[in-house]
Image (cartoon, helix red, strand yellow):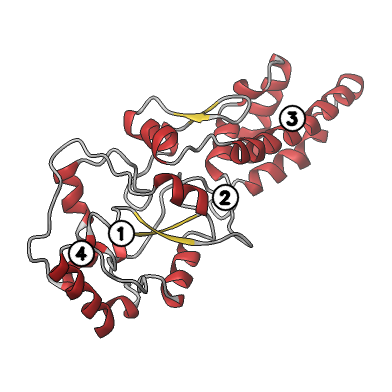
């Protein structure tokens, strides 16, 4: 989970169209989500979310190149039926995170209800709702939690923050097998290259041989790449992944110099 920069004033025009207003009005009349066509699922909205999220899942950070791209409701549309077409309630998600989260939306305070919000004003309600409800699930579009994420040497993610931990372990299951395998592969490949350099370093004492692989790892640590938060954690917590103190010192020195 990384902070996503979404322009909440740059709302896809389709979400303000007459047929969305009609669908919104039908939901209000029925006091439930009644849109059998799921009109929030439309090409222009999908395209905009793909760009904003760099084709990555809001929660697990997997790249969704050839995978199904789900438009996920932060606040479930079946409960918050008036927010089904709200721009600040629509996120990009992988199928696994979307299905795992489902209708889950635990809150610490009282749940908000529809109070005659106008169709044109539904796109910027979450900040106020968050203050009232205090959701337990993190909203990547609203919150910076990068420094609250903790990974172990095998790529398992957790947090000492109650809400972040709730999102990881309960809402989205961010330690499911496929994610653990992909994160483990990142650190295993990096460690393997560093270990080979170290064996040669012991013979030739040439620290520069580490430089290309460290530079490459740093270059790959961008928000556009998948698992940015894990790569970021590795760079800033070398001791977690390398037991050899000499290697730790070499890597920290070079990272500080090259970053």
| Closest to the observer, 64 or 53 | 64
**Is 129 displayed left or right of 259 in the figure?**
left
Q: Earlier in the sequence, mark 2 or mark 3?
A: 2
Give the foreground label among 1 and 3. 1
The residue that label 2 is drawn on is 62
Q: CA distance from mark 3 to mark 4?
A: 49 Å
Residue 177: image quadrant is: top right
The residue that label 4 is drawn on is 82
Give the foreground label among 3 and 4. 4
Give the x, y percent position of residue 1.
45, 44
| Closest to the observer, 3 or 81 | 81
Farthest residue in the bottom direction? 18
Question: Which circle marks residue 89 in the picture?
Answer: 1
Give the foreground label among 2 and 3. 2
| Closest to the observer, 237 or 165 | 165
Residue 230: image quadrant is: top right
Give the foreground label among 4 and 1. 4
Question: Badge 4 local density, few (<14 within 10 Å), some, or many (20+)?
Answer: many
At 59% across and 52% down in the image, what residue appears? 225
The residue that label 3 is drawn on is 191
Give the x, y percent position of residue 101.
40, 46
């Amino acid at each position: 989970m990384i902070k996503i920069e979404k322009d909440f004033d740059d709302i896809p025009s389709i979400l303000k169209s007459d047929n969305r207003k009609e669908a919104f009005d039908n939901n209000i009349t029925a006091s439930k989500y009644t849109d059998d066509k799921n009109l929030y699922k439309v090409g222009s909205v999908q395209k905009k979310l793909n760009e904003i999220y760099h084709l990555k899942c809001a929660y697990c950070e997997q790249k969704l190149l050839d995978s199904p791209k789900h438009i996920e409701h932060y606040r479930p549309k079946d409960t918050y039926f008036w927010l089904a077409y709200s721009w600040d309630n629509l996120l990009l998600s992988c199928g696994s995170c979307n299905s795992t989260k489902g209708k889950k939306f635990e809150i610490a305070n009282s749940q908000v209800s529809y109070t005659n919000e106008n169709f044109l004003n539904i796109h910027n309600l979450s900040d106020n709702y968050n203050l009232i409800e205090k959701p337990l699930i993190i909203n990547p579009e609203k919150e910076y939690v990068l420094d609250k994420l903790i990974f172990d040497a095998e790529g398992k993610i957790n947090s000492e923050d109650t809400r972040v931990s709730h999102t990881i372990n309960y809402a989205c299951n961010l330690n499911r097998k496929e994610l653990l395998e992909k994160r483990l592969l990142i650190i295993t490949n990096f460690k393997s290259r560093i270990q080979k350099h170290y064996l040669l370093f012991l013979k030739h004492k040439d620290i520069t041989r580490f430089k290309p692989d460290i530079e490459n790892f740093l270059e790959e640590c961008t928000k556009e790449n998948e698992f940015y938060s894990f790569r970021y954690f590795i760079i800033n917590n070398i001791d977690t992944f390398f037991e050899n103190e000499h290697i730790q010192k070499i890597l920290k020195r070079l990272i500080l110099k090259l970053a």
